[in-house]
Amino acid sequence: MPDRRLPLVLVLLLTAALPACVDVRSFAGAWSGPIIADEPVLQGFDPATRVDQLVLANVDLRGVTAVLTTTDGRFQQTRLTPVSKFASDPLATLTFDGSPLRTYMLFAGSQLSSDPPGVPVWLLVSLFSDDHVELRAIRGNDLFGVFQLNRPK
C-alpha cells in the first residue's frame, strides 16, 4: 500500500520553497528621490542632492543594467558597471532594515571635475518589496550617501 503522506510532504516542501523564488523584474523602469540628509549617513554630498533618474533594465536575480543621473552633476546619464561576480556572493542577498529582496553592486566614475579622477564610486542598489529602491553611493571615506527612490509620478 503506497504511503499517502508523501503528496502532503511534497506540497509542504514546495510551499516552504516559494518565498525563495523572488521575481524582481517589476523593478525595471525609472526611479528618483532625495538623499537622506542625516549627518550619520551623509558625507561629501550636498544635502539637497537628488537622484534625478536611476533607470533599471534587465532586472533579474543575476544582475541589472542601470543608468544614473544626479542633480549635482556627479553622474549624468552614467552607465553603471556591475560587479560581475557579486550575484554569486552571499552579499547579494544580505538583509538589513526593511529586508531588501535583492542588492546589486555596481560602480562608476564621477563626472565632477572636483572629484579624484580614476577613483570609482561604488553603488549599492537595493530593491524592496514595498516598491521602493535604495541607492548607496560610497567612495572611501570622502563620499557616502543613501538615496530613497520611488517611481516618478
Image (spheres, grey):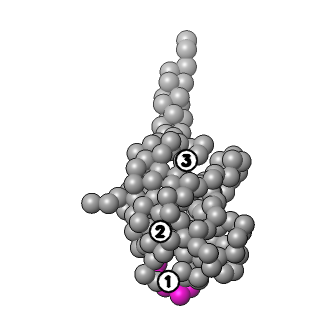
Gap in angstroms between the C-alphas marked 3 and 2? 19 Å
**In this orientation, which residue lies closer to the viewer: 114 or 38?**
114
Density class for disc 3 (Cα within 10 Å; few <14, some 14-19, many ≥20) is: many
Residue 9 can be seen in this image: yes
The tag earlier along the polypeptide, 2 or 1, is 1
**Magenta segment, prevailing SS (helix, strand or loop):** loop
Q: What residue sits 64% from the left and 64% below the top? A: 109
In the image, which is nearer the foreground, mark 1 or mark 3? Answer: 1
Distance of label 2 from label 1 (alpha carbons): 11 Å
Residue 56 vertical placement versus 98 (above, below): above
Rendering coords of residue 89 (x, y %): 70, 51
Amino acid type, mark 1: Asp
Residue extending furthest toward the left: 153
Q: Horizontally, is 95 left or right of 134 in the view?
A: right
Q: Residue at x 50, y 24 (%)?
A: 7
Local SS, label 3: strand
The residue indicated by pointer 1 is 46
Q: Secondary structure at mark 1?
A: loop
Q: Position of residue 41 (x, y in %)?
A: 55, 80
Residue under the image location 45 percent in, 43 percent down: 25
Give the amino acid at mark 3. Val
Q: Residue furthest bottom?
A: 39
Q: Please state if 80 lies on the left or on the right of 7 as rendered.
A: right
Inspect the magenta stretch and tell me whether residue 8 lies in it. no
**SS for tag 2?**
strand
Residue type at the position of mark 2 = Thr
The residue at which mark 2 appears reads as 70
Instruction: Mark 1: give few (<14), some (14-19) or many (20+) Cα within 10 Å.
Output: few
